[in-house]
Amino acid sequence: MNKQQTAKLFDPNHIAAVEFLAAEDTNTVLGIWFRMLTLAIHDPEGRVRLTPGLHMDTAELAAWFHCTEDAVEATIQVMEQLQQLTRVPDGTLKLLACSGLCRRAKTKKSVVANAAATEKETEKEKRKEPKEKSKENNKKADIADAISDPRQRTVTETECTVITSSAEPPRRKNTRQIPLAELPEPVQEIVEAWNQLPLDNHFDGLFPAMVKQLQALLEQYGKEALRKAITNVANSQFLLGNSRNSRGWSITLNWMLNPDHLENILQGKYQDKKPRSNSLLFQPGDEQAPYSNGFYGTVVD
């Protein structure tokens, strides 16, 4: 990618458009967009993937970028609106600015063949020019007749309206978060219960994708089961990031909404283990001390 292409991708107007569409998620969207560029710029077809032929959907990209699927989906929707990215029918993503950057140099034979083909196309275009001009003149004449004839004026205006509307870009789905107060009542209750946990990742709202995921789990498990899961999280020093085995990791809402993780939480897999009363390692009052919960050997998926 040369300097002109790079400047076009990261010019102030482009960044301002991203800030307008992504709002408070601008830094996240720009970070994921840069990572997409690093993959697509080395792909022969300009696709976002590690190697040619490898299929990478939204979930796989989120795992590779170490972020949530909602963040990847929000970035995709923003860049689709800016016409910088397109979805290929097989589910992969293609960056228009990176398409064809890594193709091998053409051989002399292919260059000659392409030159011959270009010459033929030029001749065809020359032959088409008189026909196109004739069609254009006929079209202008039809429009002039329609304008002069009151009976055809309505039809002409309708046709112009259709042409104008078709030229407008299609509206994209809203990528903004749904505020907490506007969420469905069951979803709002679960999010409010989550926000009571002693964690940093609290929510003022949710992206539509996470709302759908949470609603599906509510239909499958019920509201009381999800409340129980949050209670189990509150009683797990490991999930809260306070255990020696947490190693700085703490649970996120997106991680808990994974069906496999939710099942483990409901089954009490991550609950704190109470020390034995006759153990020499624990004394009365040690239950509140750091790392005294005895939660060892836990493996996070």
Image (cartoon, grey):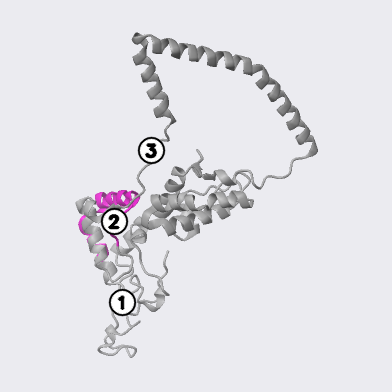
The mark total stands at 3
Q: Hey, what amino acid is under mark 2?
A: Gly
> Do the CB atoms of the residues marked 1 and 3 lie less than 8 Å apart?
no
Q: Nearer the viewer, mark 2 or mark 1?
A: 2
Q: Dot 1, how many residues are within 10 Å of its Cα: few (below 14), some (14-19), or many (20+)?
A: few
Residue 5 placement, left or right of 69: right
In the displayed structure, 165 sits above or below 235; it is above
SS at circle 3: loop
Residue 250, percent from left and from top: 37, 69
Residue 114 placement, left or right of 101: right
Earlier sequence position, callout 3 versus callout 2: 3
Q: Hey, what amino acid is under mark 3?
A: Arg
Mark 1 — residue?
Answer: 273
* Near-viewer residue (152 or 233): 152
Q: Dot 3, how many residues are within 10 Å of its Cα: few (below 14), some (14-19), or many (20+)?
A: few
* Near-viewer residue (82 or 215): 82
* Near-viewer residue (152 or 70): 152
Image quadrant in which you'd find residue 268 = bottom left
Q: Nearer the viewer, mark 3 or mark 2?
A: 3
Whether residue 18 is visible to the viewer of this picture, yes or no, is yes
Mark 2 — residue?
Answer: 205
Real-space Cα separation, disc 3 to disc 2, in angstroms: 23 Å
Task: Give the residue displayed 25% in from the left and 89% down from the top.
Answer: 284
Mark 3 — residue?
Answer: 171
Residue 116 placement, left or right of 25: right
Which stretch did the figure color magenta?
203-230
SS at circle 1: loop
Earlier sequence position, callout 2 versus callout 1: 2
Q: Dot 2, how many residues are within 10 Å of its Cα: few (below 14), some (14-19), or many (20+)?
A: some
